[in-house]
Amino acid sequence: MLESTPGYQTKDIPGQLPPDRLPDDVDLEEVAKHAVESFKDLKHGVLTEDALWRDWMSLSGQNRTFCGSEEVIKTWTKAISRKHVNDAEVRSKRVLRPCPGSAWVSVTIAYNTAQENGLKGFHTANVGLISESGTWKIWMMVTILESFEGHGHPDEPQMAPSAEPALLPNGLDYSVAIVGGGQGGLSLAGRLKALNIPAIVIEKGPAVGNAWTSKYDSVKQHTLREYNNLPFGRTWNTDDPDLLPGKVVAHGFTKYTEKYGINVWLNSEVTSCSRNDAANTWMLEVTTKGASSDSSQTRTIRTKHLAIATGAGVGAPSMPNIPNTDQFKGTYIHQSSFRNAKNLSNKHAVIIGTGTSAHDIAQDCFDNNMHVTMIQRNPTAIYPIEWVLETQKYLWNLDMDTGLADRMGGTAPVKIGCEIIKRNMQEAAKQPKYVKLFEDLEKHGFRVDRESGMLDQIWQRYGGYYIDVGTSKHIANGDIKVKSGVAIKSLTENGIIFEDGEEIPADLIVAATGYEPDYRKQVAQIVGEEMASELPEYWGLTKNGDVRGFMQENRPGLWMIGGTAPQARWTSRFVAMAMMLDLLGIDNVVR
């Protein structure tokens, strides 16, 4: 039996933003010189007591956060003795004020490692410094493995067959099998191909990006187009909408596989999976559907690594336990079965839930002249799309390389990223027009969570908020009704009755209540319950602010891949390099 436990709340995780106490006359040259010298010889006195270090496989060989000067120096000292840092030089320096009330000097350093195992690594670091009692000290470091000499580069795609032999151990058909052709699976496949590692993507649907085309017709991204590129440049056309419709997303995925020659089996499903621990390999039976059942084909493949990328948080539908559903004469469905509300004009729709899908479905019902009521269980964070676009356009735009934007905006310790976004959004919420929007929402019964930051919601709950692309105004003016804070008692023949005795009529009830959150249950459908029960929990934060099970080899040769498009794009480069090291027989982790 799989049991889930909540992760740590960001408020309980070490680390905090430094106050804005930078002097007006900061000598960046002097600070940069101090930073690189401290970086070469990290010791007590050059770090603040609560310093944070986020390592992306660079020195510790791991993707994790180290908290406090004692832990940082202890791990750093062991890592340096093995990795032999050399040629450290300053690449850039700047003052950062990413949110109200906080500032520091950021120094970017490039450096190499000459390791005992023969690897020569290329790396970058972003070092954050503040002034304490007249002395510059490091309060945060982010170290990033870029590539290894002679082993390709995860950011440079192979557009033609490599002259070097593929990294494929004897007896294997592929080095990596990826189950799922969404943003996570395709990002990893692209990175692996860049490193000359043979991989196969096994996609159950008739096309990659099937998760986008199998949802309700009006589905679209609620974040900026350029924020959602797959690896290697631009995935979509510059004249595509800022908020991409689901069909355009899926089409972009298809173009990506064609452009970079990603090996994909469509209409294919893993029907059998077994593990040979002695040989450290997986054997998969993959059935590909033909035009008829007689034309289906089953193939057996052997692989070293198995990456499950079926989409964490979008697996089995999660339905509320409501009595008397069999008595309801209308249509009662989960959001996964909703397509559109055409031909339902003047009928009554009840949407259970107030997250993104709930708002989108409510909007579609309203646009088709239905009488719409949303059922809210808990206060919901609302983030106007203007906030999101303004934040994302600063880095993710047509003038900025996506990889550089990722390094600048998505590599800090999770706690720090959450705090920056939270402060900026709380400041934006003070603007009069948004104060009025939230007040109007609450006047009409919609309870607004004004405190939670978006990244907190993503890392801790995998969602549960709404980026307002237009539906909130219909709630705020009463066009879409809200029933909040009262439990559902049961369904009736003609609607829903609540614990307070109110009954709301309904012809259509949509449970926009999301999906089974425990990713291990999806993984179990492929590897079996016994093996899945041995896996660590997926998602939610550890005590140091890392994401549980995310971007890790959770069992030898088994990976659980998920996350948003930016998360998949960035973390896939490190998963690919970790797989490469394993195929080379190199243990690069400092323990």
Image (tube, rainbow, N blue to C red):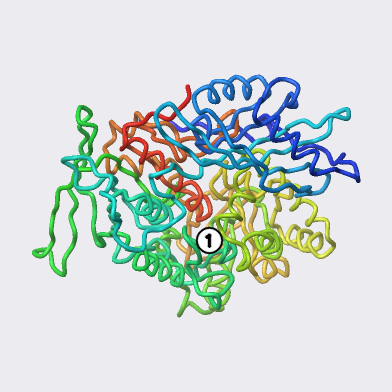
In the displayed structure image, the side of residue 166 where residue 573 appears, left or right: right
For the image shown, how many numbered marks are present on the structure? 1
Front-most of residues 343 and 42 = 42
Query: On screen, 243 above or below 273?
Result: below
**Where is residue 379 drawn, in percent x and y?**
66, 49
The three-letter amino acid code for the residue at tag 1 is: Asn
In the displayed structure image, the side of residue 191 where residue 202 appears, left or right: left
Front-most of residues 197 and 254 = 197
Instruction: Count neighbours of disc 1 (C-alpha within 10 A) and say few if under 14, some if 14 to 19, many if 20 or more.
Output: many
Query: On screen, 281 above or below 257?
Result: above
Q: Quadrant of the N terminus?
A: top left
Q: Residue at x 60, y 28 (%)?
A: 66
Q: Residue at x 23, y 57 (%)?
A: 268
Confirm whether residue 235 shows in the render. yes
**Where is residue 3 drawn, in percent x and y?**
43, 31
Confirm whether residue 322 shows in the render. no
Mark 1, residue position: 228
Q: Residue at x 59, y 64 (%)?
A: 224
Q: Which secondary structure lies at badge 1?
A: helix
